[in-house]
Image (cartoon, rainbow, N blue to C red):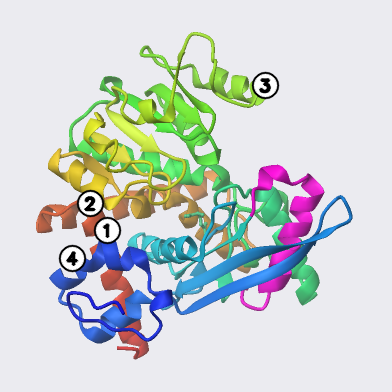
Amino acid sequence: MIIRNHERIHADEENLCKKCISELEDLYSYLELSREELDLLDMPRRSFTVHFPVQLDSGKTKMFLGYRVQYNDARGPAKGGIRFHPELTLDDVRDLAFLMTLKCAVVNIPFGGSKGGVVVNPKELSRHELERLTRSYIRAISDYIGPYKDIPAPDVYTDEKIMAWILDEYERIKGEHTPAVVTGKPIELGGSKGRNYSTSLGGILVLEEALKKRSIRKQEVNIAIQGFGNVGENAARILHERGYKVIAVSDSKGGIIAEGGLDIPAVMKHKEQSGSVVDFAGSKNITNDELLTSDCDILIPAALSEQLNEKNAADVKAKIVLELANAPTTIEADNVFSDKKIMLIPDILANAGGVVVSYFEWSQNLNNDYWEEDKVLEKLEKIMVTSFNDVHALCQEENCSMRTAAYQLAVKRILYAERLRGNL
Ligand code: GLU
């Protein structure tokens, strides 16, 4: 039985959110939340575990395991990505759904939070198997998603091609066009202009606000980026286009560094041809861990979770960490960074650009009114800059980390919505 500081006892301990317990405990005591408020935040509203069959190319059928967790929907329909990963657990999905709830609240868009996924290594499936797996998973959860219920989007190892299959399968089941059921779709099927690079751009917009606050000029900084998937690659590209010096990048096979700066368009071409950034001419190969502790001013983790941890945090040299991945920093590393006065821009703010443009996409679908890219980018910038300034002001006022300030802002907004609904 789990009994914490404030003696919370739950009947359904299995479903408690680890993230709330470990990371928000101090904040909850500081905010002096009541027992009712804590109960409301500790547990997801709905969790689905599904087993579904997929026919493989060999003709055999294999059962797969999938999840969808709708953590909280007080502020609007649940919103969150779908990831395909061989090590995915229900605990991960629950934590990520909680983070999505906080993320939508911190940037003040009218959504709750959810997350889903399938336990699978998509690299081991053929394109047709991947399509059948996606469709079968959607059939398993189709009653629980919808434009006013819960809206999926891309996440780790899922992309716009997969969102198109989700849309098609859902529409076949419902028998009508429903583009707002999923975001991150191809533009031809109702996707929004700017969505595919919005997570990276949103992060760069808040980074630029942070640089302004610290009076750092872009010519002065060296940047290292871990991860060269959609988010990492677009971040490298946009930073390069804006005149920043990106000195190191990596993917799952390893990393590269060039102190004088990397020619990012050439690295992108190299990756396209060889399958990896490794062995890029004029650079030195390094490991992913060497990248994280490299001599850079700004470190951007844009890969998987828990990359910055008790083993490497003390060796991190960056002055600013921009979390473009979800949960890339452990609590232990967080404490080390606070002691070292490293400015950490937390995931729920740094990578919120993706869900902000998902909100624009959903809104365009519901109104059947499609926007020019300029309009999307202008509205994205406004939300990201306002959110950064809200969090930064609170962090100065309360003399706390940006993560604590972002959590505080989000938690207060969620509880306020619950109170207005009469749930508190
Ligand atoms: N998977 C992304 C995230 O973690 C996007 C979610 C969305 O657009 O709904 O923020």
Three-letter code, disc 1: Ala
Work out whether mark 4 precedes mark 3 in sequence or the reverse, and give the earlier one.
Answer: 4
x 71%, y 44%: residue: 124
- Residue where numbered disc 3 is placed: 273
**Left or right for 228, reference 52:** left
Work out whether mark 3 precedes mark 1 in sequence or the reverse, and give the earlier one.
Answer: 3
Q: Secondary structure at mark 2?
A: helix
Asked if labels 2 and 1 touch by Cβ distance under 8 angstroms, the answer is yes
- Residue where numbered disc 1 is placed: 406
User: Residue 410: image x %, image y %?
Assistant: 30, 66
Q: Nearer the viewer, residue 396 or 311?
A: 311
Three-letter code, disc 4: Asp
x 52%, y 75%: residue: 47
Looking at mark 4, is its residue's CB closer than 8 Å to ligand 1? no
- Residue where numbered disc 4 is placed: 26
Alpha carbon distance from label 4 to label 3: 49 Å
Which quadrant would residue 210 be assigned to in this image? Answer: top left
- Residue where numbered disc 2 is placed: 402
Q: Nearer the viewer, mark 4 or mark 3?
A: 4
Quadrant occupied by the N terminus: bottom left
Looking at mark 3, is its residue's CB closer than 8 Å to ligand 1? no
Looking at mark 2, is its residue's CB closer than 8 Å to ligand 1? no
**Location of residue 88 with respect to 295 vertically, above or below:** below
